[in-house]
Image (cartoon, rainbow, N blue to C red):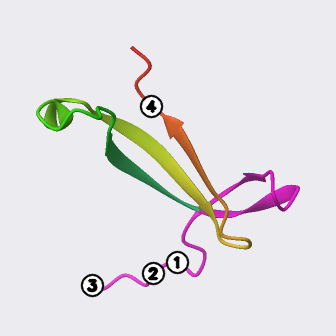
Amino acid sequence: MATKPSDLDGVTEACSECARETLHKVRVELRKESSKPNNAEYSREPYRVATCMECQTETTLRMNNA
């Protein structure tokens, strides 16, 4: 049985640019933090990236603060 995708595909969060609660697309992204080319592949960290669907403002949060 096929499922119908949701019309509102996202998360409602506060947007600092819009100054109100808006729908956001959220994803997790691995980012390289080392500026040294030989260590870059070992310095990847997960980041939560949220993009406001109203104003396209993007916010990031490092998820691993070890």
Three-letter amino acid code of the residue under disc 1:
Ser
Question: Mark 4–mark 3 contact, CB under 8 Å?
Answer: no
Left or right position of 51 against 20: left
Disc ID at residue 5: 2
Label 3 environment density (alpha carbons within 10 Å; few <14, some 14–19, many ≥20)? few
* Label placed on residue 6: 1
| Residue that badge 4 annotates | 63
In the structure shown, which secondary structural element does the residue marked by tag 1 occupy?
loop
The quarter of the rendered structure image containing the C terminus is top left
24 sits to left or right of 9:
right
Q: Is residue 16 magenta?
A: yes
* Labels 1 & 3 near each other (Cβ < 8 A): no
Alpha-carbon span between mark 2 and mark 4: 28 Å
Which residue is pictured at 54% across the width and 71% down the height? 9
Q: Which residue is mark 3?
A: 1
Decide which of 64, 11 is in the foreground and name it: 64
Left-right relation of 48 to 20: left
Task: Specify the quadrant that holds the N terminus.
Answer: bottom left
Magenta part of the protein: which range?
A: 1-24
Left or right of 36 on screen, residue 7: right
Helix, strand or loop at disc 2?
loop
Say what amino acid the circle numbered 2 marks. Pro
> Is 13 or 38 nearer to us in this picture?
38
- Image coords of residue 3 (percent x, y): 37, 81
